[in-house]
Amino acid sequence: MQFNVSTGYAFRIMIYLAKNDRTVSSTELSENILISRRYLLQIASKLRDGRLVETSMGMSGGYTLLKKPSLITAYDIILQIEGGVFIPNSIDDKKNEKSNLYFTMNLLKNYAEAYLNSVTLEKLADKKADVQRIEFNNMIESQIASLKHNDQWEG
């Protein structure tokens, strides 16, 4: 799975807004997350179209989160910039849906989406959220170890 650079900047924008909990000007945002103002406006328009941020004009204008950080997930952000998490077209085909490759790729997609939906903007903006990330990681590692020992996955 690979996300484009815009997605990384979208996360930076959203985290900055969550940490500041106020209307933030495009100038302040671009200076603090080290992005050109023009590129910021392009990414922010996608976030606005996705109803994640709102924009206001004027002297005190800028960007504000539309929802509480606890209600915005990493998947919400990725959905607006990337369009979602996808299985490659060559694998996501009706004739392949019973193959081990299709099953495995679909399982990976589902795990990725579940994890991304479990990570809120509030957690991303909070350094103390590492405990929850570690717990989720341990659960996934346990399930992977179980799959490795399952006979149906061998050779």
Image: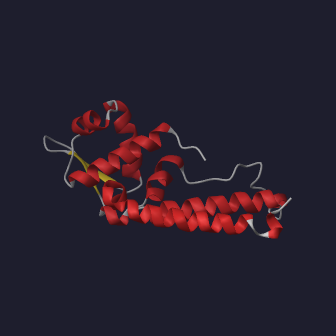
Residue at position x 50%, y 65% from top?
136
Give how far across and how far down residue 16 sits, in percent: 28, 47
Instruction: Answer with the quarter of the image where residue 39 lies.
Output: top left
Q: Is residue 117 left or right of residue 26?
A: right
- Residue 19 visible, this angle: yes
Give the quadrant of residue 73. Answer: bottom left
Judging from the image, the colouring scheme is secondary structure
Left or right of 113 on screen, residue 154: right
Q: Residue at x 28, y 54 (%)?
A: 18
Residue 126 visible in this rendered orientation of the protein: no
User: How many dots with numbers?
Assistant: 0
Residue at the location (44% across, 61% down)? 133
Q: Position of residue 68 (x, y in %)?
A: 29, 64
With respect to residue 146, does 53 lie above or below? above
Q: Position of residue 21 (x, y in %)?
A: 21, 55
| Image-quadrant location for residue 129 | bottom left
Choose between 10 and 83: the one closer to the eye.
10
Q: Position of residue 58 (x, y in %)?
A: 16, 42
Relative placement, left or right, of 21 versus 5 is: left
Query: Quadrant location of the C terminus?
Result: bottom right
Vertical relation: 19 (above or below) 59: below
